[in-house]
Amino acid sequence: MRTVSFSSPAVRTMLQNDFVCQLINTKGDPTSGASVGHAPSDAAGLCTRGIGKQNVQCLFLTPSGEIFHAASGYRGPEDLRSELEFALTLYRAVRKQPANASQLVRDVHIQRLRNQGFSDDVITRSDSSGMLMAMRTARDFAELNRSTGNPVSQAFAIKGRNSELSDGRFSVHYPMIPMQKFLEDPRILVGHESSAFQSVGNGGASGGPIGR
Amino acid sequence: MTKYKRSIVLFLGLAVLATCSPADEPRRKWKDKSGEYEVEAKLVSISSDGKTVSIELRDRQFVDVPIERLSSDDRRYLLRHKRLESRRVAADRRPQELQEGRTVKLYGINWHQTLESALAAGQPSKVGTDKPIMCFRVLGDLAGFM
């Protein structure tokens, strides 16, 4: 994301002007994925939306330290700009209704997931089974992609859509959760999987264990 | 589309651009190819295919204008901007400790190193409104290997 998304002038302008930015290196965190360690000078590899959620998370906090929105996994310049605009709009709404902030954050994320095509039972289900969600969204995408049937693009599309769902469900189930509380167990956002995608030197992707 | 209609569309587009005010680029006058229409606006970015220029509006909206419709002066300005931007991005990739606070400047963005520092910076101040915090959790060193 650093060589593509943060190098986008529009993203950089928004982050500098409208947000306070904080950086956390999650090395050593048991919920992190694996990485082969790219240098800044390496060419950016191909990456799709939502991939690598164990390794990359954008958390949006109020100045009181409560998380009102999360976007985990890779976001390209346009996607990241869109997340920043969404977060800024939601933050301004939260500022106007501080007493009702949790309900507002929950409602806005439910509506966003509905707009993305998720049904209410999937959105509000309390279990966090990644496999169940994957099966559900795989079925949705199988219908959408029946005509094309490209298994690789379908797999990445499913992964990205799963990531959107789990991000939204995080805000639905934990609206305005204090950052310190979140840090006690980031799995409520990044999931309970024991392996994750990782990018490799040639720009492709491979599997890797969590917590290395 | 007739030449007259194209001119109307371009004029409306440029009229909207007149309300732009992004922070990084200077405000300047932009003209269309015919020299007939002129507005003041600020550049945000150039598309990766080099065909469109994006300008930020005062209301935070971005407007895209085909570069081929702009005057030769504007196109030269965009070429100069692209060269300078390439150098600036390369320089930004090197970490630069800022003098005030516990922040590091990377990719043109000031990054706080602790949650306490970021939360303090987001508090309401006399010079502006409060800001939300964007906490970027990443495996690795943003300035080095990751």
Image (cartoon, rainbow, N blue to C red):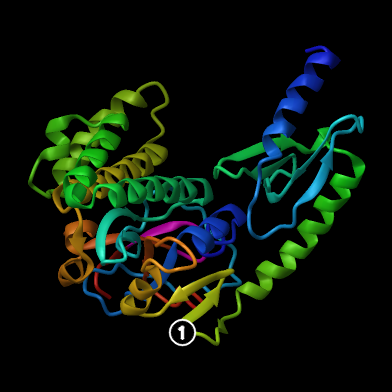
Check the image and report above or below for B121 versus B6.
below
Span colored in magenta: A200-207
Main secondary structure along the magenta-highlighted residues? loop
**Residue named by callout 1:** B101
Which chain is mark 1 on?
B
Amino acid type, label 1: Gly
- Apparent side of residue A204 relative to residue B85 in the rendered image (left or right): left
Residue ranking furthest to the top? B2
Spot occupied by residue B50 in the image (x, y as percentages of width and height): 74, 44
Count of labels in the image = 1
In terms of secondary structure, where does tag 1 sit?
loop
Instruction: Left or right? Give the position of A212 relative to B90.
Output: left
**Image spot of residue A138 (x, y percent):** 25, 35
At label 1, counting other C-alpha atoms closer than 10 Å, the crowd grade (few under 14, some 14-19, many 20 or more) is few
Q: Nearer the viewer, residue A32 or B131?
A: B131
- The quarter holding residue A72 reads bottom left
- The quadrant of the rendering that contains the C terminus of chain A is bottom left
Q: Position of residue A101 (x, y in %)?
A: 21, 50
